[in-house]
Amino acid sequence: VQRIRRSEQSKIDEIAVGVADCIFPEMSDLYEPDQTGLYDLVSYSVSELALNVVQHSNSDGFLHAQVYPNAGLVRIAIADYGIGIAKSFEASASPHWHEGMDDLAAIHKSLEPRVSSKTHLSSGWGQPVNAGVGLTLLNGLAKVTKGDFCVFSNRGYHRMGQNDIILDAEAGLRGTVCAITFSQQNL
C-alpha cells in the first residue's frame, strides 16, 4: 500500500517502479522487453492510475498492489477521495462534459480512447496535458487477459462484463476507485 500525494507528481515513476520491483523483483535488473513484459506492464499500470489521482481528483489517493503467486494473478487498485470523474470533466471545462452528465456516463466517457478531462488543455510544448489513453488501455488489458476491471466514481459503478449501477445519493462514495486484476499466464 502506498500513498499517492497530488503534490508529488514527480514521484509517480519512482512509485510505479517500486511496485513493479516488489511484485517482480527477479525482473528489476533485466533490460530486454521480451523478458520484462510483466514488470513493464505493472509499472505502466501503476503509473497511469497514479497520474489519474494527481491530475484529476483534487485529492490524494492510495495505491494497493498485490500478487497471488499460486493463482498467477496480479491486482492493482487506486482509490482517492476527490471530486470524481464527472466533476473532473466539469471543473476543467472539458468538451466531453455536458449538463446532466451523471457519474456512470462520465465513467463510460473516460473509458473511450483519447478522452480525459484534460485532453483539451495544452502543456508548454503544445501537447495535451493528458492523452486520455490510460483507462482505455487498462480496460483493454483486462479484456485480453480475461481479467477484471472496475471503476467506481461517486455514485457510478462499472465492472467489465457486468451490469452497471447507479447508487442512491446516500450510498455513493466520495472519489474514485479503479482496479484491475490480470492473469500472468494470459499475457
Image (tube, rainbow, N blue to C red):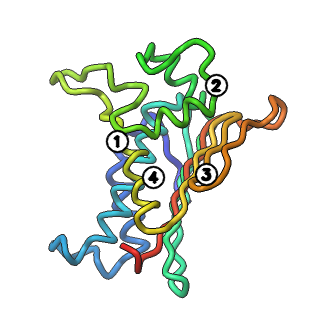
Q: x and y percent of residue 39 in the render?
A: 32, 69
Q: Sort mark 4 into few (<14), some (14-19) or many (20+) by Cα contacts within 10 Å.
A: many
Q: Earlier in the sequence, mark 1 or mark 4?
A: 1
Secondary structure at badge 1 equals loop
- Contact (CB < 8 A) between labels 2 and 1? no
Q: Which residue is mark 3?
A: 159
Label 2 and label 3: CA atoms lie apart by: 17 Å
Q: Which residue is mark 4?
A: 139
Q: Which residue is mark 2?
A: 102
Residue at x 55% of width, y 49% of height: 178
Q: Can you tell which mark lies on residue 133?
A: 1
Q: Please, is residue 83 above or below residue 152 in the view? A: above
Residue at x 36% of width, y 38% of height: 113
Q: Amino acid at mark 3?
A: Arg
Quarter of the image containing the C terminus?
bottom left
Label 4 and label 3: CA atoms lie apart by: 10 Å
Q: Earlier in the sequence, mark 4 or mark 2?
A: 2
Q: Can you tell which mark lies on residue 28?
A: none
Q: Please, is residue 27 above or below residue 128 in the view? A: below
Residue at x 64% of width, y 54% of height: 162
Q: Earlier in the sequence, mark 2 or mark 1?
A: 2
Secondary structure at badge 3 equals strand
Q: Amino acid at mark 1?
A: Val
Q: Earlier in the sequence, mark 1 or mark 3?
A: 1
Q: Please, is residue 172 above or below residue 30 in the view? A: above
Tell which residue pokes out farthest to the bottom in this image.
70
Label 2 and label 1: CA atoms lie apart by: 21 Å
Q: Earlier in the sequence, mark 4 or mark 3?
A: 4
